[in-house]
Image: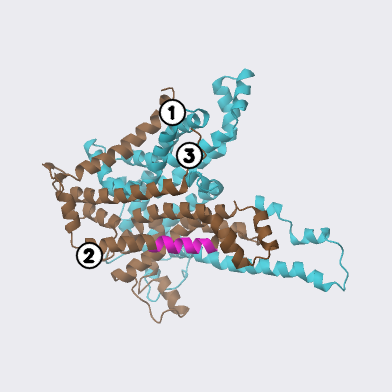
Amino acid sequence: MRELATEPSPSTSGVLDPPKTEAGTGNAATPRKRDRKRWGLTVVGSVVALVFLAPYLIMLSGAFKSRQEILKVPPEYLPGDWKFDNFVNMWGTPETPLPDNLLSTVVISLGGTLLALLAALPAAYYTARHSFRLKLPFMLLVLITQMLQPTVLASGLFREFVSLEINDTWLAMILVNAAFNLSFAVWIMHSFFATVPKEIEEAAWLDGCSRGQSMRRIMLPLVWPGIVTAIIFTFIACWNEFAASLILLPTDTNQPLTVALTRFIGQYESAWQYVFAISIIGILPVVALFAMIEKHLVSGLTAGGVK
Amino acid sequence: MQALPWLLPALVLIVGVVIFPAGYMVYTSFRDLSRFGKDRGWAGFENYVRVFGLDPLPTVLTNTVVWTVGTVVVTVLLSLVLAQFLNKKFPGRKVLRMVIIVPWAASVVMTSTVFVYGLDPFYGIINKFLVDVGIIDEPYGFLKNATSGFLSAMAVAVFVSVPFTTFVVLAGLQTIPHDVLEAASIDGAGKVQTYWSVVFPMLRPALAVAAIINIINVFNSLPILKTMTGAIPGNDADTTTTFMFKLIQNDRQIDTASALSVVNFVVIIVVIGVYLKVVKPMREVNA
């Protein structure tokens, strides 16, 4: 919105322009030409948008097709009769216990997000507020965990959790998700805390605020966008996690949606209609959440490498 | 020492779930493990010798290089164009930005499965579309052989990597001061000339960040190849990452898989080293 608001629309700039005579068609053509060029860009943009949406439109259409329709040769682009059946029937199919899978995804995502936040918040606050000898090494360590992914450590994580006897539990995945998303949360909240001048906090203490009060009334509102970004990003990353769950959660009732989904795809028979109905449910909420934090993501993911 | 209570929760998580398993993995790579996880003692470099002696390894290594370099290069090129486009002002630009984040936000497994379905030679809608617009004459089994399956998977990897990369490049474009561009045009520089001599050099830091983060993500990627070419027998469409997962899941060779993981781990550490050296992130952190 911000960017659009600063840009005067063609009509308002016309008001500000010196009045044109009928004869001055040469002048009048310029804004109109520019206008046409802009709409030309919109047309190109629509095509680009269609390319990026295409797989999800296929998904949407498939989620409303019947089993016969989705396996029809040759296929049709759209379902003949849009039916909600798949969204109802998918919960009780023999391939996977879907209600359990949804519960797993929700529990692991909420647990992972909460744990990451609890660990990241004090670290982000302290590193933004204080200087200490091991600060750079600490931030470096945090940064490196962001670049290491559970995929490369899968066999080590598997061995560790088997030894601890927490393999095949939600706890294992909550720990993995929290640890590997900690970095983003620390970084983004650190950068928000760092923008709040220390003096504001000190002034609040002088005015008789307790440390807790100044935190709640002064800091929190200022850094809230950073905290929300950290929460949403971590939640989405947990929600979409696949590789570690595949290795660490062998029992079907413990598996999240991402892993459960692959059970519908068989060598001889696949229940695509359910795959797509589940995908719609798995994707819609995270896209909506993602859109809310889009403008903070680049700085958080590149640790300030691009500003 | 005052810092410790504040940093402790984060440190416990990092040590417990990143550093310890990394160490355990290195340790395991020197042990002899049974298929059921029983530790049968010291193995020396046996696991490493076995990994490097595996028949599919040359193919897998070549695939890994093609997969990573190919995907990242194409992603960066497309993102440069797309970011340039998004940097223009036109009605609907905001909507387009929102649309482009969809493949970034969506689960990669879910996105990949659409392509598995769409590229099916019988009921696949993408195949039908390609025939309808005349790109191919008849439906083709893209995922039925290793070569075309691997290339299709690369295309999907590009598709899901472009949004993040575009946004990084776009952030880079927006750091270029307007008067620099104006000065160039006053000096009589054409559009192409301005791009190559002014815009592109200023984009280099953003490109370095985007390229390196992509290298790590693409190198580590499991879901795309797992869903798209996982059903093809053999290892002709495997990278070191998917090969390692097959060793764990299908063959239950945790020790051999660990040796291969350590090799992957070293590759990633080198890339991280390059990242720290070239990009110098965290420059805003004052010690």
The answer to if A60 sits in the magenta stretch is no
The residue singled out by tag 3 in the image is A187
Q: Quadrant of residue A58?
A: bottom left
Mark 1 and mark 3 lie on one chain; the one further toward the N terminus is 1
The chain letter under disc 3 is: A
Confirm whether circles 1 and 3 share one chain: yes
The chain letter under disc 1 is: A
The residue singled out by tag 1 in the image is A133
Residue A97 appears in the rendering = no
Q: Which three-letter amino acid code belongs to the residue tagged 1?
A: Arg
Q: Which three-letter amino acid code belongs to the residue tagged 3?
A: Trp
Confirm whether circles 1 and 2 share one chain: no
Residue at 33 percent across and 71 percent down: it is B148
* Disc 1, SS: loop
Residue at 27 percent across and 48 percent down: it is A247
Question: Which sits in the foreground, A243 or B46?
Answer: B46
Q: Which three-letter amino acid code belongs to the residue tagged 2?
A: Gly
The residue singled out by tag 2 in the image is B234
Residue A258 appears in the rendering = yes
Q: Which residues are magenta?
A: B70-81
The colour with which the image depicts chain B is brown
Q: Which chain is cyan?
A: A
Q: Is residue A231 above or below residue B203?
A: above
Question: Which sits in the foreground, A80 or A9?
Answer: A9
The chain letter under disc 2 is: B
Q: Is residue B10 above or below residue B124?
A: above
Question: Which sits in the foreground, A290 or A79?
Answer: A290
Tell me which secondary structure the magenta stretch mostly adopts: helix
Q: Mark 1 to mark 2: distance in Å?
A: 52 Å
Answer left or right for B183 relative to B274: right
The x, y position of residue B103, in whole percent, is: 47, 57
